Amino acid sequence: MAKLTLKQRIGIDIGRRVSVEDGIEWAAQNDVQIIDVQTDIHPNALESFDAKRIKGVRSAKEKHGLRLGLHTLSGVNVAEISPFCRDAVDAYMKAYIDLAPQIGAEWIVVHGGYHFTACRTIRMQASIERLKRISAYAEKKGVMLLLENLNWEPVLAEVNYMPVTPAETMYFFQQVQSPALRWSFTANHAHFLPGVGISNFIDAVDFSLCHEVRLADNNGSYEIHQRPGEGTIDFGAMFKKIEGLGYQGHYTNGFTTIEDMLAGRDYMLARAKEAGVKID
């Protein structure tokens, strides 16, 4: 298989903006090699993937030679501890894992959930134990899970995601020792993390764990997924840093519309080229 160019390695987060079928056709028409989708609600509700739809999605994906990933919803609390709800979260994640090989999805982005300030310890442990169970299940199914570093919330916020910091991210991986769990590095989340930033975040985490880099611009102050050039991220320096580490995985644009993400890819490539990164 020929080595992909940097342009070919930058994918698009279709999410639930359009159906997965339309997303595949759109990607093929626009020279996009990699997409990910969310299968929570319309137009990609999990329950809608019957045998006919599964066959159609897989056939279209294989016809165009695309790479496909799934992306669970960060609003589902992986750190859930309440009766009934905690079982539902396990069932939710297993359903994603069951669907992935049927439609030919190669990875699933997952999250550590969130805690309320007074119960951080118990919820973090619940998240880790759940990820251990789900990773073991993914191993049996031959599915790769990618744990995303999530966004920092203001100091006085009652609800906080996890993992957010480099230390939290490494703690999760130290606790969940599974070949089925790797890292989805969201650069824009690292960018506005106080006192850290993209380069320092990368230096503080074992980057060999990284199997995806998620991209959007950010104003450096709070959580917002902006078009490249609207915020303060130096994309040239970012690509130079990551590519300089020998990273050969994919990137995923995740902001505004699919048309903006397509145009944003060209902006990013121009900044990478200016920084001396090989893009062809």
Image: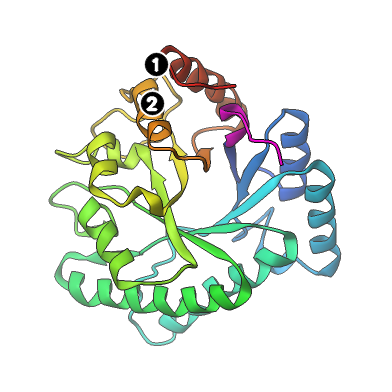
Where residue 145 sits in the image (x, y, percent)? 50, 62
Which residue is at a point 55% across and 73% down the rendered structure image?
138
On the image, which quarter does residue 46 sit in? Answer: bottom right
Magenta stretch: includes residue 6:
yes
Determine crowd level at label 2: few under 14, some 14-19, many 20+ residues with C-alpha closer than 10 A: some
* Residue 16 visible in rendering: no
**CA–CA distance between discs 1 and 2?**
7 Å
Which residue is at a point 39% across and 70% down the rendered structure image?
78
Instruction: Write down the residue under mark 2.
Output: 240
Determine crowd level at label 1: few under 14, some 14-19, many 20+ residues with C-alpha closer than 10 A: some
Which residue is at a point 39% across and 24% down the rendered structure image?
235
* Residue 28 visible in rendering: yes
Going by the image, does 159 lie left or right of 143?
left
- Where residue 188 is drawn, which disc sits there? none
Magenta stretch: includes residue 13:
no
Give the number of marks: 2
Instruction: Write down the residue under mark 1.
Output: 275
Mark 1 vs 2, N-terminal side: 2
- In which quadrant of the rendered image does the N terminus lie? top right
Kind of element beneath mark 2? helix
At label 2, the amino acid type is: Lys
- In which quadrant of the rendered image does the C terminus lie? top right
Q: Is residue 255 above or below residue 40?
A: above
C-beta proximity under 8 Å, tags 1 and 2: yes
Kind of element beneath mark 1? loop
- Which of the two residues, 187 or 15, is positioned nearer the viewer here? 187
Where residue 106 sits in the image (x, y, percent)? 63, 57
The part of the chain drawn in magenta is 1-9
Going by the image, does 14 lie left or right of 126?
right
Going by the image, does 264 lie left or right of 159?
right
- Which of the two residues, 175 or 189, is positioned nearer the viewer here? 175
